[in-house]
Amino acid sequence: MKRKTLKDMYLQYPYKNRDITSNTVPQPYFPKDQIVCDHKYSLTYKEWKNILGIFFKHVMNALAQGFEYKFPYEQGRIGLRKVKGGGVDFQKTTKGNVKKFKNLHLRGWRFLIKWYRYKNKLQYKWVWRIRLTKHAWSYINEIFKNSPREINNLSDA
């Protein structure tokens, strides 16, 4: 099953607009008959991606403060949970000798993302999965490095 990316989501957006300053083929490509210039919600891919970037940073900040994000259409909610002990450091682990992260800046705590799915509403739960990108993990980790007390806002897993 193919992953859905931001480009795939933009191609579903009904008010696509083409960048006027560019003379090349638009990326992602869409036919000329799908261009909508005169609508107040028409956006280029670059504008649309910037708006989503701001939204995702807002969600990451809220998750780091201990809030949960509730998905629409009763698909559940996600939140960060804190866990004692470090995860396995696969770069330093050798055969028979498992090394773990120490997380000294967080006093041994680490965080995980948890998706609470509603039992009866979401069909084919085994198909769906939420994964944060490496940029999102590093962004949240940077928040906790700058202010280690923020991890106390998270509930235990």
Image: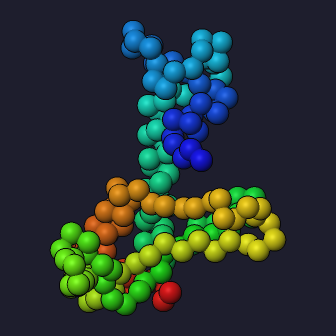
Seen from this angle, which residue lies furthest right?
Answer: 120
User: Residue at horizontal 73%, vertical 72%?
Assistant: 118
Residue 121 pos. (x, y %) = 80, 66
Residue occupying the far top of the picture: 23
Foreground residue among 5 and 15: 5
* Direction from residue 125 to residue 3 in the image, left or right: left
Q: Quadrant of residue 126?
A: bottom right
Q: Is residue 42 visible?
A: no
Q: Is residue 130 above or below residue 68?
A: above
Considering only vertical position in the picture, is 11 above or below 83? Answer: above
What residue do we see at 48% from left, 67% from top? 62
Residue 46 horizontal/vertical position (percent): 44, 31
Of 5 and 19, nearer the camera is 5
Residue 146: name its quadrant: bottom left
Q: Residue at x 21, y 69 (%)?
A: 91
Please provide percent x and percent y for residue 83. 41, 86
| Relative to 17, residue 127 above or below | below
Q: Position of residue 25 (x, y in %)?
A: 44, 14
For image coordinates 43% across by 65% down, the residue present is 61
State left or right for residue 141 relative to residue 113. Answer: left
